[in-house]
Image (spheres, coloured by chain):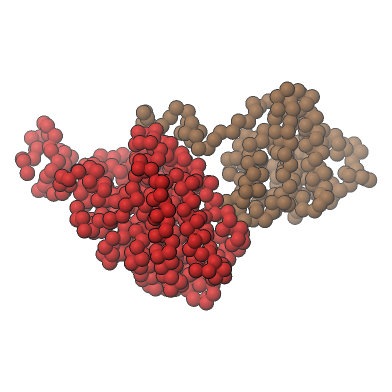
């Protein structure tokens, strides 16, 4: 573990999440090109680190007007240009991606970022993506459950034998590279309505993330309560020790009326809620806050009253055609005026039993203490995954391995 | 005396509305028929006109504003539904269908429904059977075999003397009352209770496919 590369963040993590939409700016009629928008995403992420934010997360889509079909490529590039930022996803499609590819790509990202990454599983909400990738949307939930079971095995076992309903069976398969330090990437499970996903997150002792953008927060409250209760049921600790992340959405200006005036055309034409409820109604019903830094602070400092003390707060800031200059100003305001106050507010009266936000460094330490972490060194390749237990030198060969092929001491 | 609850969905656009008049007749007659069977009944009337903006917003944003959410909850948790719509362009009103569209597709499964419809002339009366009934069948609701259609003339001169509206209302209401009486009272299954989404006594292992769980 390279301590220099690990984030020093404790307590809560704050950051931004992006959908990766390429939307026409309704005030100028300008639509950025894919090249411009992809470069903008890199600028936004590096700027997030500059203003003291902890996390940058990107979505996954496979159709225009979105650019983020290949999140690990983008995130690896961002990780290379930053030192402290955790890169993540919002979300990675657990339904239509081959879990083997997820295991490989994100383990690779974990190595390249020095552990400054995690990922969020989601099912996706674009119907045709399922058939494009050879799946059936009616199997969305069973896919999410089976694919994640396999992904978890690929990250935690060097050699996997697998047979499931949705994927070609695997015999003696090893996903490479092995997770950095032998610790699988931290996983959040995102859902807006499905209790089975809260159950899944709790079962594995993973994090649960509520999008907290599109709906009234009470919708997510029930899911998070369930997740905390089931976390406890599966023996991971008291309900308040579960790992909860929340989305959110804000548009900030020093003067609250300026925020309203500036954001309204973007709200009114936004792909998701445009031409629907008024901005006033929507900000009242959902966590979207359009106003002064203090208004955003007040709204988000109160989230824990609904959800309990939590670990990660992400804001949606670059969407609906907002130009890059505006997004960067928003990130300035968020990082300089809002988040420092939120950090203090949310640290007050935070019970000692509530865990800090997950980092690779802390998870490595929890497993190995001050001892050395795993370094996976392949044994000489004899194609013997099936017979010799593990293709890695540090794994002890099983007693009485077949055909006398048990490895000599490394 | 046991108590049941009926949700009346009325999607007339004018006020006063002949759709609502028909809905009220059907509700009152159903309540009377249930009381005859020693079943007390509470009736919730939902006027979709009052929720029209919220219904549109729900279609666009994916969530129901609070007043609509309350109405939806009253419908899906009722023991039975009386659904009444004007016939526009040979089918249910768009507002009526939009309300149905914002319900969870499984929400009306097994629920007794009495269909009512109204229009200017009796020439539209089959719309109940070719347009509205298939909608409820698709949703796996259980519409009673009588649907009650009221033409404008049913309310006054030139009404049907042989099978008057009151007799049709009485027949539909009786069928709905019988359907309600046959069923156990609806109990709210909390969707966030593990017994609901996993099945009683089951664990995540069952979702993983045939494992025994804990």
- Judging by colour alone, the chain drawn in red in this rendered image is A
Q: Position of residue A137 (x, y in %)?
A: 46, 48
Q: Position of residue B164 (x, y in %)?
A: 88, 38
Left or right of residue A72, residue A385 in this image: left
Choose between A347 and B6: the one closer to the eye.
A347
Choose between A365 and B85: the one closer to the eye.
A365
Choose between B146 and A199: the one closer to the eye.
A199
Q: Quadrant of residue A401?
A: top left
Q: Could you tell me how many numbered marks the image carries? A: 0
Q: Position of residue A49 (x, y in %)?
A: 33, 64
- Give the vertical position of A42 relative to B159 (above or below): below
- Give the vertical position of B67 relative to A4 (above or below): above
Left or right of residue B40, residue B156 in this image: right
- Give the vertical position of A210 relative to B32 (above or below): below
Q: Is residue A178 visible?
A: no
Q: Is residue B70 visible?
A: yes
Left or right of residue B149, residue A360 in this image: left
Left or right of residue B183, residue B17 in this image: right
For the point 77% across and 53% down, the residue is B13
For the point 43% across and 66% down, the residue is A333
Q: Position of residue A85 (x, y in %)?
A: 31, 60
Outermost residue to the front: A348
Chain B takes which shade in the image? brown
Position of the N terminus of chain B, as image quadrant, is top right
For the point 46% across and 39% down, the residue is A226
For the point 39% across and 64% down, the residue is A335
Position of the C terminus of chain B, as image quadrant, is top left
């Amino acid at each position: 573990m390279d301590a220099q590369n690990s984030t020093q963040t404790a307590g809560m993590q704050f950051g931004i999440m992006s959908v990766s939409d390429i939307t026409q700016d309704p005030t100028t009629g300008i639509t950025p090109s894919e090249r411009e928008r992809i470069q903008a995403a890199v600028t936004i992420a590096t700027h997030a680190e500059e203003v003291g934010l902890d996390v940058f997360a990107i979505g996954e889509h496979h159709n225009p007007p979105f650019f983020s079909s290949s999140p690990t490529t983008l995130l690896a590039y961002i990780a290379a240009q930053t030192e402290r930022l955790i890169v993540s996803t919002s979300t990675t499609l657990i339904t239509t991606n081959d879990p083997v590819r997820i295991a490989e790509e994100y383990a690779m990202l974990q190595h390249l970022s020095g552990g400054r990454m995690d990922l969020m599983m989601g099912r996706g909400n674009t119907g045709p993506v399922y058939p494009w990738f050879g799946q059936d949307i009616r199997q969305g939930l069973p896919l999410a459950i089976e694919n994640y079971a396999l992904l978890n095995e690929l990250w935690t076992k060097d050699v996997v034998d697998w047979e499931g309903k949705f994927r070609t069976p695997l015999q003696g398969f090893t996903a490479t590279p092995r997770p950095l330090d032998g610790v699988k990437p931290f996983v959040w499970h995102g859902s807006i309505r499905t209790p089975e996903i809260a159950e899944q997150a709790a079962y594995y002792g993973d994090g649960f993330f509520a999008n907290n953008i599109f709906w009234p927060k009470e919708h997510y409250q029930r899911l998070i309560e369930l997740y905390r209760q089931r976390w406890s049921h599966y023996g991971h600790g008291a309900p308040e020790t579960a790992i909860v992340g929340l989305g959110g959405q804000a548009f900030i200006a020093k003067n609250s009326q300026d925020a309203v005036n500036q954001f309204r055309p973007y709200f009114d034409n936004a792909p998701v809620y445009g031409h629907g409820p008024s901005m006033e109604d929507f900000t009242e019903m959902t966590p979207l806050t359009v106003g002064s830094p203090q208004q955003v602070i007040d709204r988000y400092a109160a989230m824990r009253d609904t959800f309990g003390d939590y670990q990660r707060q992400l804001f949606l800031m670059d969407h609906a055609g907002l130009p890059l200059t505006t997004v960067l100003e928003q990130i300035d305001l968020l990082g300089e005026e809002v988040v420092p106050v939120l950090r203090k507010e949310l640290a007050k009266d935070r019970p000692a039993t509530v865990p800090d936000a997950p980092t690779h460094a802390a998870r490595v330490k929890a497993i190995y203490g001050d001892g050395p972490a795993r370094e996976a060194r392949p044994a000489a390749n004899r194609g013997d995954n099936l017979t010799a237990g593990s293709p890695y030198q540090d794994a002890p060969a099983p007693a009485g391995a077949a055909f006398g092929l048990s490895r000599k001491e490394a | 005396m046991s108590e049941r609850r009926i949700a009346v969905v009325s999607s007339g656009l004018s006020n006063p509305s002949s759709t609502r008049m028909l809905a009220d007749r059907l509700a009152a007659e159903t309540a009377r028929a249930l009381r005859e069977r020693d079943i007390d009944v509470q009736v919730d009337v939902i006027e979709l006109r009052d929720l029209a903006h919220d219904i549109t917003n729900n279609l666009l944003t994916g969530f129901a504003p609070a007043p609509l959410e309350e109405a939806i909850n009253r419908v899906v948790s009722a023991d039975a539904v009386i659904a009444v719509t004007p016939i526009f362009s040979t089918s249910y009103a768009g507002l009526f269908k939009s309300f149905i569209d914002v319900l969870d597709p499984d929400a009306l499964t097994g629920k007794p429904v009495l269909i009512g419809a109204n229009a200017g002339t009796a020439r539209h009366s089959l719309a109940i059977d070719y347009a509205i009934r298939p909608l409820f069948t698709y949703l796996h609701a259980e519409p009673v075999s009588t649907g009650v259609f009221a033409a404008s003339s049913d309310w006054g001169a030139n009404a049907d003397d042989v099978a008057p509206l009151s007799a049709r209302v009485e027949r539909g209401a009786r069928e709905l009352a019988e359907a309600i009486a046959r069923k156990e009272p609806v109990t709210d299954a909390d969707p966030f209770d593990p017994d609901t989404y996993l099945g009683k006594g089951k664990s995540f292992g069952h979702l993983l496919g045939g494992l025994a769980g804990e």
